[in-house]
Image (cartoon, rainbow, N blue to C red):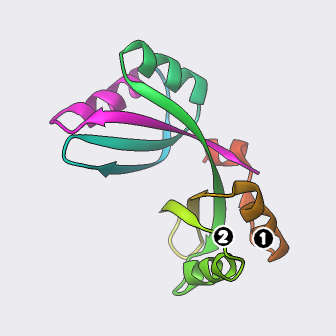
Amino acid sequence: MKVEQISVFLENKPGALAEVTRILGESGVNIRALSLADTKDFGILRLIVNDNERAKSVLGARGFTVRKTEVVAVEVPDRPGGLADILKVLSDAKVNVEYLYAFVQQSGANAIIIFRFDETDRAIEVLSQNRVKILEGKKVYAL
């Protein structure tokens, strides 16, 4: 039920993001979802890709610091309030969301939200008990 995400630490300078995406593209690694958060000096690029090991290897060989993190991919109805409903379930259970990012494959269908929780296993249990659809990693990597 967990999805593996890679985080890449980038200098906050022109071309850094372009270099990472070029390296991944040339290596045949397909980006499925991403999020970029920055500070004045550096950024953290969070990626869901089709081949984590290859991505980690090629980026590491080029001097990037790369880490793996477990996240949870949840299907959320693509309608007003869809995310709010899921967040209420988590809030009621006192589950903390550290961060999230989303993507929609087709408008009007379901959105996919990538969550990072402080207690991943507990979050999965709460979501499952409330019949929230959690996606397996292999499905997310193949989107």
Q: Quick check: 122 above or below 59?
A: below
Q: In the image shown, does 88 or 93 lie closer to the viewer?
A: 93
Q: Quick check: 58 above or below 65?
A: above
| Residue located beneath label 2 in the image | 95
Counting from the top left corner in percent of width and height, residue 110 is at: 61, 70
Q: Is the residue marked by circle 1 packed among few (<14), some (14-19), or many (20+) residues within 10 Å?
A: some
Task: Please give the name of the residue rendered at 39% of the width and 42% of the height, measured from the top-left corner.
Answer: 45
Q: In which quarter of the image is residue 54?
A: top right
Residues in magenta? Answer: 1-26
Identify the amino acid type marked 2: Val
Q: In the image shown, does 16 or 78 lie closer to the viewer?
A: 16
**Would you say residue 133 is visible in this rendering?**
yes
Is residue 76 magenta-colored? Answer: no
| Residue located beneath label 1 in the image | 126
On the rendered structure, is 84 left or right of 12?
right
Spatial CA span between label 1 and label 2:
8 Å
**Mark 1–mark 2 contact, CB under 8 Å?**
yes
Task: Please give the name of the residue rendered at 42% of the width and 12% of the height, measured from the top-left corner.
Answer: 61
Q: Quick check: 53 above or below 36?
A: above
**Would you say residue 104 is visible in this rendering?**
no
On the rendered structure, is 120 left or right of 63?
right
Between marks 1 and 2 in the image, the one whose residue lies nearer the viewer: 2
